[in-house]
Amino acid sequence: MSLNDLYSPKQQEVLRFAMNNDYFMLINHGAKRSGKTVVDNDLFLYELMRVRRIADIQGVGLPQYILAGSDLGTVHRNILNELTNKYGLEYKFDRFNRFKLFGVQVCCFGHGKINDLGRIRGMTAYGAYINEATVSNPEVFNEIKSRCSGDGARLLIDTNPDNPMHWLKQDYINKANGKTIAEFHWKLTDNTFLSDRYKQSIIDSTPSGMFTDRDINGAWVAAAGIVYPDFNERIHLVSVDKVPPIIRHFVGVDFGWEHYGVFCLFGAGIDGNIYLLKEWAAKHRSIDDWIAIGHKIVDQCGDILFYCDSARPDLICEMQIGGLRAMNAIKDVVAGIGHVASLLKQRKLFVVKDNVSLFKEEIGVYAWKENADEPVKEMDDCMDATRYGVYSDKIYGER
């Protein structure tokens, strides 16, 4: 088996650099599924063995190494489980989320929240591997960097791109000199182990604009323009007679008073598509009125889930007391918009045109805020209810 059977040309380029240069920080950034995490996982093992050799020279019995992800779950999913599947590695954790490998104590941390900071302070590490770095809390990231004070310490970093004003891009990637800081940019096409058919399916299903730029080309671009550029009223607005039998219903809920409160009733069709069957939108309507509407929906569709804006736990509680299966929606803005946009591009999300009004008003003017990965908070009530329902159903629904 040759090296070409194990690693893509891009991965080999990074491996050659890492094994022949004394860098401090190596940043692999770019498109999803491009192969960057695979090579960083292998470099993580290489670094542990290198650290052990340094520790032997210095007479250090048990050197420490930091392994960090957005949370401990991602550390397992993205790194440890992958290495177990690839090499059969097993890990025996202590109660502090540490394990020993190759004579090095690997200390696992989350980096996404400021409360992760206290667990890292005070230690001396001989290196760190930081996965999904753009979601790091910058104070936690800086603390990890400062802890890497052992002789010859290095940081391995991988991430998908974000806004070009993100601190990781401005403070580190843009300042890379190929020595102290080295960076490698990855595109989907760099993964030569993916079939052409699979790569084309990813390209075809990725929404236009920012999502294609980031997820396919690995570019650090700002969100700009209309949020759903692939929406076409001639394609996505359908008459009720085009709706197939529905196998599951769910509701997206955005609460409002001075702005619109919205219920969006969705159905998952036997054809695998999602249909916005009907919207209810009104201002200055009490929660009792909305609960009454919810019961009418339940009478028609069964005991279905209502995915609600978690900013109003009091109203969710009122809905639950009123007998509705209300729960917090998943509110990840970019991921939620990306999922809705992907369904629109793939022609898997349709709207019954005669049963909606606010949706048709908002969809064409729903736009990104300048230099921010979030939409302008205007004309967004039905758009939020749509995102809450459709994205939460992706995570929780019975597919």
Image (spheres, rainbow, N blue to C red):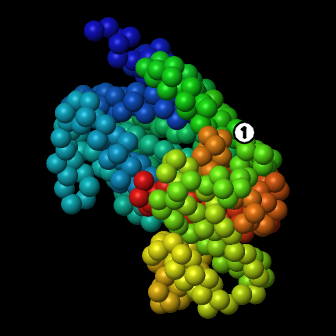
Residue 231's place in the image compared with 49, above or below, is below
Residue 52's place in the image compared with 93, above or below, is above
Please, what secondary structure does the residue beneath circle 1 have? loop
Mark 1 = which residue? Answer: 209
In this view, the residue in front, 126 or 226, is: 226
In this view, the residue in front, 209 or 223, is: 209
Residue 142 in view (yes/no) = no
Residue 207 in view (yes/no) = yes
Q: Quadrant of residue 129?
A: top left
Residue 318's place in the image compared with 47, above or below, is below
In this view, the residue in front, 363 or 98, is: 363
Name the residue: 74% across, 59% down: 353
In this view, the residue in front, 71 or 66, is: 71
Q: Identify residue type, mark 1.
A: Gly
Horizontally, residue 41 falls left or right of residue 330, namely left
Name the residue: 39% across, 30% down: 38
Horizontally, residue 196 falls left or right of residue 370, namely left
Q: Quadrant of the N terminus?
A: top left
Horizontally, residue 94 falls left or right of residue 206, namely left
Residue 149's place in the image compared with 122, above or below, is above
